Amino acid sequence: MQPQPQRPGRQAGSQLRVSAESGAQWSSGVMYCFGRTSWNDFALTPRSMASANQENISNPFFSQKKISGLACRDGVVAFVHEHGSGELWIEEDTDEQAIQGRLMEMKLPKDDKIKVVDCGKSSVLVLSDTGKLYEWIVPKYQNLPKAVNPRIMKDLEGTCIIQVACGDDHHLALSKDGRVFAWDNNQIHSGSVLLRSLCGVPVAQIAAGGNHSFVLSVSGTVYGWGRNNAGQLGLGDTNDRATPVLVTSLEFKGVSFISCGDEHTAVLTKDGLVFTFGAGDRGQLGHNSTRNEVRPRLVTELWGQPVSQIACGRRHTLALTHATGKLHTFGCVHHKQLGRRTAGSQSVPMPVKLPSEKRFSLMVDRIFAGGDQSFILCLKKKDAEPLETFRTLLPGKRISRMDHSMLKKWTAKSEGKSRKAVKADIELIFSSAACVNASFLSQDHHLRSSIESLGLDLPRVRETFKILSESNLLLPVKAVVQRRLLPNQPTEPASTEVLRVYLIVTELIDLLRRKKYDIGTITAIMAAAILRQNSRCSLSLESLWRKIPPDAFEKLVLVCRDASSQLMFLQSEGSSEALQNTLSVLQKLSNGRRYNPTCHRAVHLRDECPDYTPHVFQDQAFLFDQYPCILDMDTKLFLLRTQAQRMTSDIFVGDNTLLVNRETILADTLQVLKQNTFQYWFPLKVQFAGENGIDAGGLKREFFKVLARELYGSADGMFQVDDSSGLLWFRQEEGSELYHLIGLLCGLALYNDCVADFHFPLALYKKLLGFEVTLEDLEELSPTVGRQKYVDACVDHLLNKSIQMQFEAFKHSFQKACPNPMWTLFLPEELKSALCGSTKFDWEHFEKITRYEEYDSEDPTIRNFWTMFHRFTEDQKTTFMGN
């Protein structure tokens, strides 16, 4: 006889069971089964009931073997027993009147024991206790083997798997190092696919529905993809998704478990709430309606009685309450899978009374569902332990993470094999961003699953690295992070929670920095990973930098600063690219408002290289233009002056003396500038009419000081003078010629290294450097302007559009009179300070950097001078230095 294909007319539609693989041990194998098949169909005999009126499918089955796991789908049921053995029941081709099947033993090769099973539409996944994954293809015809011998999945051989999940025709696997693999029945021979967008996500659970999938992170974040025709992804629409997408409506819900039906989904929170979404045509959502829901909706009938477990069948849902141990069911009842005799669908959760629960003194311990089938595993009350809950993740199903016990094991004095085991653990955890992320979450991490608060326990991160350092394990960790973790960071992660790893690695590098280890290479690799992020994650990372604690931001800046310093003076292959990557990240940091150019200095050229000349770093001169953040203000001033010296030394220096009268200094100067015969590239020398003296620098400094005072005193006719701030601004009605001349004066002062406070607001220097002016700038110019009265349009008008012609004349002349390009390196505050002078002086630093001719710093004359100088008042010191 030719084998016959499965009979037509089988149940249409996809069917699903949620994998319920637990390592818990059962004190007895007492289970209830209701739905399409009964114990008799499984060739198992249940305990007979006292009442002949009760239906056989509701009778409990007392197994001789303790059952530790179960999986079911259309026509397939798999049992896992306590000691790692397993049985598989396959429905055979039968007539319409009865269901028949065969119960077969599942055998794994060698000494492997079965830990987890899950069933797809045409295949069964078997996971061994050693993390090996096997697959068995369900025969399409009725001639079944006597025993099931799954074959190992070759492409995942060598990968330790801890969770599996099956949909109709697709499968998921989670590895111990946090990677998620996916494949469908058409990929059996081509192998599984690593879901790279989920790399770095600390995965807690994987779940698969008919044709949709979910991943739940340890921090309670949910990602979904696949078919979405009924809204089963909970994204607010019915569009399918090809790649994992963050389910934003479940953020901050504290999701702890996910179960999927054919076209519906149920999630359980750590507070015991149940949300459902997707297809509701059979009442499987529990909202007292048959309407589909495209967003997660709370099952209100279960509110007030915290739920500990949920399970979804094809079109029905089970929920077990924690306090009472009561089972509630809702959804399709066509095959009596809800455990009640009611006709039609049940659209609200209703409690189920198990027929002999009291007789045998039983309590529900685990629930399973799949296809049109439900299984209830019970304990005898006298043997019962605390009720298991899906609200906490069992250790055997968790990805690797560094907890207190592992850290204690690592830091214990060990040699030989133990030391090798520690290194293997370090390699496993610190090569995986997912494991690193999972290791340092705060205790309330379920409430912190967004970019606003990533739930990272930074104090524990720092304490851990400190302990590792004391145990001489810091360098092995650094080697793994540098070699494997950072180079493999995803460029398009599914969520911003992947970005936690950069904060953790920064703490590692900072400790290395403080212990004087080389950090240039590892920081450059981290910077390259950051720069590879797509635009969405790049913006999220910059937003995260604005929200992290100030000390964490400070460490990130200092790490990039010191790494830049090391790389700048490193002459090796690839050092230029490494330096540019590090500086690019530092530049991103400097663009934020939290960046302090005074505190966050990047490179101290004179400290790092005392013999610096402009020619020394000629090959890296481009860095100054692209990354001005690397230089502190002292260094920028130093570069400004040395570049000016270089420019004047490269040309023939002619006479560039400005002759002015003290009484008419402003008019005389403007008259000379109007003649347009002044040579701005030449060093300026000043001579006052009727006075003898050679300008060695003092006269021109006095000239600009007096000139600025005269200009401010005559400003009423040239500028607007704000009564409250005393600052000058352009007159809208004034022509451009005057401001052309004033721009020349300012440029001359800066080019010739002279201080001249022209009383301009910071807005002027922002505009010179191309920075955007803001409402705060307007308030500095005119403090009486209220925030409520003026808006951005008003700011733009007053500081930009209304004086555009005047400012452009000023700017053009400023650039003409100061041809030194180094001034563009300054920040607006720095440029203002360079031109107008600073009102705050570090006199101790000034003494330290002073150079002497024919004296040294320890000479008694020099010591006496500084002793007297430090006794001066601040005004006396400033006056003395200005003379």
Image (cartoon, rainbow, N blue to C red):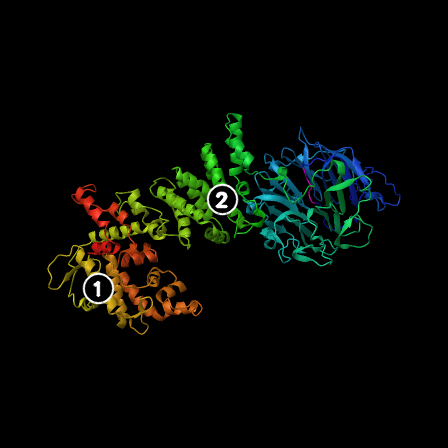
Which one is nearer the viewer's eye here, 582 or 477?
A: 477
Q: Classify residue 710 by image quadrant.
A: bottom left
Q: Amino acid at mark 2?
A: Leu
| Residue that label 1 marks | 707
Q: Seen from this angle, which residue lies furthest bottom? A: 733
Which one is nearer the viewer's eye here, 77 or 193?
A: 77
Q: Amino acid at mark 1?
A: Leu
Helix, strand or loop at disc 1? helix
Q: Residue at x 50, y 25 (%)?
A: 415
Secondary structure that dominates the magenta span = loop
Question: x%, y% of residue 97?
Answer: 85, 46
**Span shown in magenta:** 18-22
- Does the rendering let one see residue 15? no
How many residues crowd around disc 1 within 10 Å: few (fewer than 14), some, or many (20 or more)? many
How many residues crowd around disc 2 within 10 Å: few (fewer than 14), some, or many (20 or more)? some
| Residue that label 2 marks | 458
Question: x%, y% of residue 862?
Answer: 19, 45
Q: Quadrant of the C terminus?
A: bottom left
